[in-house]
């Protein structure tokens, strides 16, 4: 690995994505706003990553994402200390590491930003897992604040009118909840605008991700893991739309200039599951050393995967379906179908699956997806056993050996 | 003690559910529908003329399921898939998956895609149970399930059949509750392992047959109580958790001078707790019970309902301590553990955590832990 590090600096500089700085500025401003909400009189809501944020934006409530915080804790490699704290509080060592680090962090104000601002309310949408229900119950008891649960029934094989009606009714309850706890009426006209901004942001994010259809891909999934933050945290705002316009322009320019994320892109791979936050750089370099670029992933695309169900002029009516039929809230066979569509779209040679101990709805079923895709597309895949933030579950030597062996298989296939 | 003949039939069914199911099928030519979790609407299955059978799983020897499920999936889910793939559950005419935890949810998909026999259906009940919209949705899901089951089993499920089924289940639950009351009054009236067998049989056996056996058994218990001498003084314990398919824990606790006098288990009180809603429509009445009954940790009905319920149970049953049983990799229960523990600590109720992987901890070690815990409890 040391040899690859010696690559000439100008070459490396050329590949760096310039928008990164602006993205960091936006996120810094966002966190300062959130942390100082107490002084500015704004309310703060903690919300799950797949939760309906748009009504919060309409009500001028600052949305804060414990999962994004979990990713930051992982990326800054502060997970272990907080995880041990959670264990000392009685949480089993095999529970979701996002939940555990967040639950621990709330009690000590630790982590990279000294803890999240205290919530005035909690909004939990179980479209990503059942864990968030338990997690938000715990935080609602700890902070003694109101909790709204948006219950999105799991769509194993179908989305039904009964589900539509149930979730749509809950969106009404959600608005009522916000009116009650914000002490003001909901502005339906503003909802139209925010809904449009949300859809525009999602479309732009999809366009950004789609630039990797080009060879060489101007960015990789590792870049997407980073740039994802805005579509998660600031979905429905002008900032997110403006930023993704800028990023899209930069990607288009890179395509025009022939700049790829990986210098000699030869193999194109698809990543499945959450990132291994504390090892994104290591993994990115490891694959790049094999001339492999992770051109797409099932994770970051989940924030625009529901565009097919949305009507931007009728956001409130269609959001029930959009929030219910997301990637993790569907059956394994439909997930495999999505993966195969991505394999075709991005012209992928192989799949890298992160079997993530923290995330059962994402990981259980991966073996079946792997088999389905191998059988129907003839594409090999690699399974990496790890965890998104718990470094103790990452075995470098073992994973390195497996990546090398997998790349050999791909080389043989491409000969 | 219940008459040996009755009790032996119950013990045998609990010991070997698959053997029971196969002989039931040969004997009656009736259909058997497997299910997971205490939220499966058993009354509807029974009204369709089929035997609802809760799926318990083998606890070791898992090979076939390793191709589908990672090692960090609980032994219950892995074992059930192993039994399905190996054909050990071939007697099933179908299987019903009520929405519970993330693991069961994925097991449903994997089952649907890989198990070649029997029908498969999901009953995606609401997760939160304390709102009007959830109530409305719950009723619709159960009504849709009724129609689906009619198609899958090619039968008509009439309102009369549903009411008869509800009546049977109502009586059965009443007797299960009676059995618990009798044990709570005198823990030596019936052994913990026999209560375990009865509770397991209640989700496996021909419910009509069990009702008859239990009806006689409870009468005997009541008679015996009248002639019994002073009860042995035992340390009274409540057992809390999901399923407890470990009959050995009961004699161990008893040999250490204690007795389980009540429980908060899904194959315990959650099987018989709760009443039907006073509704004309049988499905609405059934839904009402699920909405009001004490929740499992995979459902939501308020922020402190489980802890409040547990503390109340301890007080009402005059228990001195709580043993919390936790199956490794069971997320909903593991997330609730610190909060339940805190609630008990706050009330001064001693409690111990019993973590179980696929097997119980080694016998000697477990006995020592039970002895130490029971020793700590105050005598009354």
Image (tube, coloured by chain):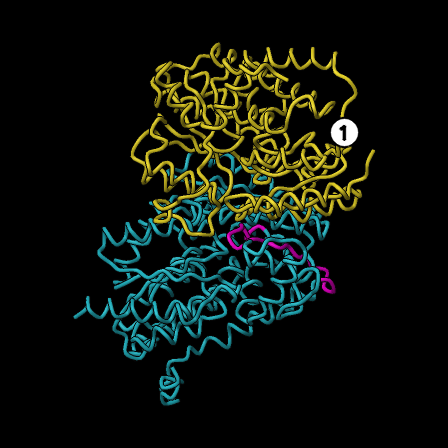
From the viewer's perspective, is residue A160 above or below residue A407?
A: above
Residue A162 can be seen in this image: no
Q: Nearer the viewer, residue A10 or B313?
A: B313
State left or right for residue A181 relative to residue B213.
Answer: right
As drawn, the chain in cyan is: A
Residue B38 can be seen in this image: yes
What segment carries the magenta color? A38-55
Q: Colour of chain B?
A: yellow
Q: Which residue is at 44% across, 46% downward?
A: A329
Q: Position of residue B104 (x, y in %)?
A: 46, 40
Quarter occupied by the C terminus of chain A:
bottom left
Q: Which residue is at 70% across, 46% downward?
A: B341
State left or right for residue A415 relative to residue A3.
Answer: left
Q: Residue B331 colored magenta?
A: no
Q: Position of residue B246 (x, y in %)?
A: 55, 36
State left or right for residue B30 relative to residue A319.
Answer: left
Q: Residue A45 colored magenta?
A: yes
**Badge 1 local density, few (<14 within 10 Å), some, or many (20+)?**
few
From the viewer's perspective, is residue A239 above or below residue B284?
A: below
Q: Nearer the viewer, residue B367 or A61?
A: B367
Q: Which residue is mark 1?
A: B316
> Which residue is farthest right?
B380
Quarter occupied by the N terminus of chain A:
bottom left
User: To which chain does the residue with label 1 belong?
Assistant: B
> Which residue is farthest left?
A415
Q: Position of residue A353 (x, y in %)?
A: 37, 59
């Amino acid at each position: 690995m040391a040899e690859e590090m010696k690559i000439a600096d100008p070459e490396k500089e050329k590949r760096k994505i310039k928008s990164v700085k602006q993205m960091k500025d936006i996120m810094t401003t966002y966190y300062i706003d959130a942390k100082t909400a107490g002084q500015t009189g704004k309310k703060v809501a903690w919300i799950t990553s797949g939760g309906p944020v748009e009504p919060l934006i309409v009500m001028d409530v600052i949305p804060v994402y414990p999962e994004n915080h979990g990713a930051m804790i992982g990326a800054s490699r502060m997970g272990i200390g907080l995880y041990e704290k959670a264990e000392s509080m009685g949480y089993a060592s095999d529970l979701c590491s996002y939940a555990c680090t967040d639950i621990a962090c709330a009690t000590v104000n630790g982590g990279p930003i000294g803890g999240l601002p205290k919530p005035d309310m909690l909004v939990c949408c179980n479209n990503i897992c059942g864990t968030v229900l338990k997690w938000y119950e715990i935080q609602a008891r700890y902070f003694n604040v109101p909790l709204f649960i948006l219950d999105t029934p799991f769509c194993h094989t179908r989305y039904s009118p009964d589900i539509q009606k149930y979730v749509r009714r809950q969106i009404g309850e959600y608005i009522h909840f916000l009116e009650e706890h914000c002490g003001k009426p909901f502005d339906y006209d503003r909802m139209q605008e925010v809904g449009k901004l949300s859809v525009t942001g999602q479309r732009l994010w999809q366009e950004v991700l789609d630039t990797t259809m080009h060879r060489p891909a101007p960015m990789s999934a590792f870049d997407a893991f980073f740039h994802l933050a805005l579509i998660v945290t600031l979905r429905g705002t002008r900032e997110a739309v403006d930023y993704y316009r800028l990023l899209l322009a930069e990607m288009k320019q890179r395509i025009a200039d022939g700049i790829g994320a990986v210098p000699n892109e030869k193999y194109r791979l698809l990543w499945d599951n959450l990132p291994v936050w504390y090892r994104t750089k290591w993994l990115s370099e490891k694959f790049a050393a094999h001339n492999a670029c992770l051109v797409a992933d099932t994770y970051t695309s989940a924030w625009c995967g529901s565009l097919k169900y949305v009507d931007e002029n009728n956001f409130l009516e269609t959001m029930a379906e959009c929030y219910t039929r997301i990637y993790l809230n569907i059956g394994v066979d439909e997930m495999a179908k999505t993966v195969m569509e991505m394999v075709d779209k991005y012209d992928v040679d192989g799949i890298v699956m992160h079997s993530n101990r923290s995330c059962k709805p994402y990981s259980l079923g991966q073996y079946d997806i792997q088999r389905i895709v191998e059988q129907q597309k003839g594409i090999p895949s690699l399974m990496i056993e790890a965890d998104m933030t718990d470094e103790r579950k990452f075995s470098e030597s073992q994973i390195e050996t497996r990546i090398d062996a997998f790349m050999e298989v791909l080389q043989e296939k491409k000969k | 003690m219940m008459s040996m003949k009755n009790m032996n039939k119950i013990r045998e069914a609990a010991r070997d559910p698959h053997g029971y199911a196969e002989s039931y099928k040969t004997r009656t030519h009736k259909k058997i529908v497997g299910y997971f979790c205490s939220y499966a609407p058993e009354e509807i299955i029974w009204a369709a003329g089929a035997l609802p059978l809760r799926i318990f799983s083998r606890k070791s020897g898992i090979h076939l399921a390793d191709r589908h499920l990672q090692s960090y999936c609980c032994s219950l889910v892995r074992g059930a898939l192993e039994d399905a793939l190996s054909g050990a559950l071939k007697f099933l005419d179908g299987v019903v998956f009520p929405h519970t935890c993330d693991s069961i949810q994925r097991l449903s998909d994997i089952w649907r895609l890989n198990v070649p026999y029997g029908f498969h259906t999901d009953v995606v009940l609401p997760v939160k149970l304390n709102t009007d919209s959830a109530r409305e949705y719950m009723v619709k899901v159960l009504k849709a399930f009724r129609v689906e089951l009619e198609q899958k089993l090619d039968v008509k499920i009439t309102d009369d059949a549903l009411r008869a089924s509800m009546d049977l289940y109502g009586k059965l639950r009443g007797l299960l509750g009676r059995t618990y009351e009798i044990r709570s009054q005198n823990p030596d009236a019936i052994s913990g392992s026999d209560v375990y067998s009865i509770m397991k049989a209640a989700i496996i056996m021909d419910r009509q047959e069990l009702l008859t056996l239990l009806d006689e058994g409870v009468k005997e218990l009541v008679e015996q109580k009248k002639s019994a001498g002073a009860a042995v003084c035992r340390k009274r314990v409540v057992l809390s958790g999901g399923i407890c398919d470990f009959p050995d824990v009961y004699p161990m606790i008893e040999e250490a001078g204690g007795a389980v006098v009540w429980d908060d288990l899904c194959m315990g009180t959650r099987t018989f707790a709760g009443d039907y809603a006073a509704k004309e429509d049988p499905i609405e009445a059934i839904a009402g019970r699920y909405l009001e009954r004490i929740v499992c940790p995979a459902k939501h009905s308020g922020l402190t309902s489980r802890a409040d319920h547990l503390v109340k149970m301890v007080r009402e049953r005059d228990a001195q301590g709580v043993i919390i049983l936790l199956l490794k990799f069971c997320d909903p229960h593991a997330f609730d553990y610190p909060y339940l523990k805190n609630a008990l600590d706050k009330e001064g109720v001693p409690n111990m955590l019993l973590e179980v992987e696929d097997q119980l901890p080694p016998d000697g070690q477990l006995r020592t832990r039970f002895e130490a815990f029971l020793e700590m409890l105050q005598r009354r």
